[in-house]
Image (spheres, rainbow, N blue to C red):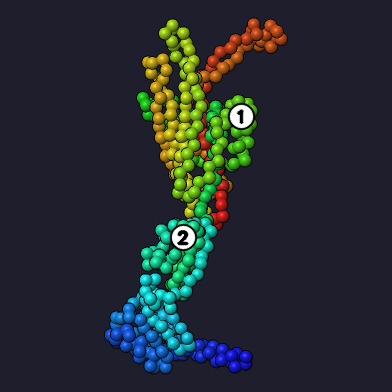
């Protein structure tokens, strides 16, 4: 037992000495096999080469270790080496189709967490792909068989590929509001479409802001929406949450109804319902710092008056790109349209008398202008940093 232990210590010491040897040697346009032979003779080691080793080198080495010397000498030809026993080195081509591969390579399994093997293979350069072995039965497990230095480089690259997807949750509140409410929120600067196209459509800018977008306090604006909703001046058309991967597309379709006044064939004024729709497409891009760039397209279907009983529909598309931060709320101007609402007029005092008050009350319709606004908040989703 003592002899075995002593032998092990001696072999370990010899191995350390071989790697700590200081090598100084020069080659000038010398064949690689001869250069390796010269190195072996000078350092009193054994270097075995396979039949693929060839080429010429010009190299000057000063006070380097044997391992560094071999790395530098074999680098141009893409060869690998391995110490198969103390003082004995094997040099060859670490190609899986080569007989030398079994002597030069070691195998390591790697378990993917966020992507599958197909994604990894798509990103890895072809020179590395030959060292990766996959199975359809285990799409998240890789077997890497390569020399240690090559295997280390492959694993480093895989770690950069196997990362959480950058996703965010886009919370939208699509609201329909009376024009008076919109002005109260500060939206009193408007851009209308050219006359003759769709005079009922208006895209809105807000005070001191351009690109149809302005930043708001999320709690404040939502509180305002709820307060005005109770009074009937604001209606929430939709409040979807969409989980979107960075660079991918999310879509929301929203519609409301406007009342259109026209005269029928009998000469009577009639109110008809016409759909007003908004299709919203968002493409978020998450930067390395975590900021979000939102590309937003808004297709708006409105109505224009014609000589026909019902209006013709027309669609306009608005596109804008803006930067925001996770947790920040922005508002984007939408469509403005005229409609009619039921109104009640009554004679003061008399109209409030129980039972007979209706005799002094008259129902009617009044013209109002509505705005559709999109309130957007981005929230982080997933494990990305």
View extreme (left): residue? 29
Q: Earlier in the sequence, mark 1 or mark 2?
A: 2
Q: Is residue 9 visible?
A: no
* Secondary structure type for disc 2: strand
Q: Residues within 10 Å of mark 1 (few under 14, many from 20)?
A: some
Residue 243: give x, y in percent of width and height: 53, 45
Residue 248 position in % (x across, y down):
45, 47
**How far apart, in angstroms, are the residues tagged by discs 1 and 2?**
57 Å
**Seen in the image, is 180 located left or right of residue 195?**
right
Name the residue at 38% across, 76% down: 99
**Residue 329 percent location from the top left of the image:** 55, 43
Q: Please indicate, yes or no, whether residue 3 appears anywhere in the rendered image.
A: yes
Quadrant in which the C terminus is drawn: bottom right
Q: Which mark is residue 229?
A: 1
Q: Pick the residue in front: 3 or 120.
A: 3
What number is the disc on residue 166?
Answer: none
What's the mark number on residue 135?
A: 2
Relative to 350, does residue 138 appear above or below in the rendering?
Answer: below
Up-down relation of residue 155 to residue 248 (above or below): below
- Residue 102: image quadrant is bottom left
Question: Which callout, 1 or 2, points to the residue nearer the camera?
Answer: 2
Residue at horizontal 41%, vertical 35%? 317
Please say if 110 is above or below 20.
above
């Amino acid at each position: 037992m003592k002899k075995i232990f002593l032998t092990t210590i001696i072999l370990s010491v010899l191995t350390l000495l071989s790697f700590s040897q200081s090598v100084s040697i020069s080659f000038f346009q010398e064949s690689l096999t001869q250069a390796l032979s010269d190195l072996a003779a000078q350092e009193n080691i054994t270097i075995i080469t396979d039949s693929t080793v060839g080429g010429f080198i010009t190299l000057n080495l000063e006070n380097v270790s044997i391992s560094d010397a071999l790395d530098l000498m074999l680098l141009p030809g893409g060869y690998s080496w391995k110490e198969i026993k103390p003082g004995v080195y094997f040099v060859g081509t670490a190609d899986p189709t080569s007989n030398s591969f079994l002597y030069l390579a070691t195998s390591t399994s790697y378990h993917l967490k966020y992507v599958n093997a197909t994604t990894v293979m798509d990103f890895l350069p072809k020179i590395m792909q030959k060292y990766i072995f996959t199975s359809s039965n285990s799409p998240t497990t890789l077997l890497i068989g390569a020399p240690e230095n090559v295997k280390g480089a492959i694993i480093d690259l895989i770690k950069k590929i196997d990362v959480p997807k950058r996703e965010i949750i886009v919370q939208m509140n699509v609201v329909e509001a009376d024009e008076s409410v919109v002005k109260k929120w500060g939206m009193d600067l408007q851009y209308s479409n050219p006359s003759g196209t769709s005079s009922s459509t208006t895209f809105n800018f807000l005070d001191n802001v351009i690109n149809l977008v302005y930043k708001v306090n999320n709690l404040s604006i939502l509180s305002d929406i709820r307060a005005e909703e109770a009074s009937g001046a604001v209606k929430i058309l939709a409040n979807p949450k969409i989980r979107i991967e960075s660079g991918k597309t999310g879509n929301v379709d929203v519609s409301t109804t406007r009342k259109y006044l026209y005269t029928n064939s009998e000469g009577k004024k009639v109110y008809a319902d016409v759909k007003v729709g908004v299709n919203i497409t968002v493409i978020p891009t998450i930067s390395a710092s975590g900021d979000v760039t939102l590309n937003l397209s808004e297709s708006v279907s409105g109505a224009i008056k014609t000589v026909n009983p019902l209006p013709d529909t027309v669609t306009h598309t608005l596109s804008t790109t803006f930067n925001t931060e996770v947790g920040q709320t922005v508002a984007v101007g939408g469509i403005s349209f005229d409609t009619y609402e039921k109104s009640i007029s009554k004679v003061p005092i008399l109209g409030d008398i129980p039972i007979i008050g209706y005799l002094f009350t008259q129902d009617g319709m009044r013209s109002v202008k509505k705005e559709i606004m999109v309130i957007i908040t981005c929230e982080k989703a997933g494990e990305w940093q």
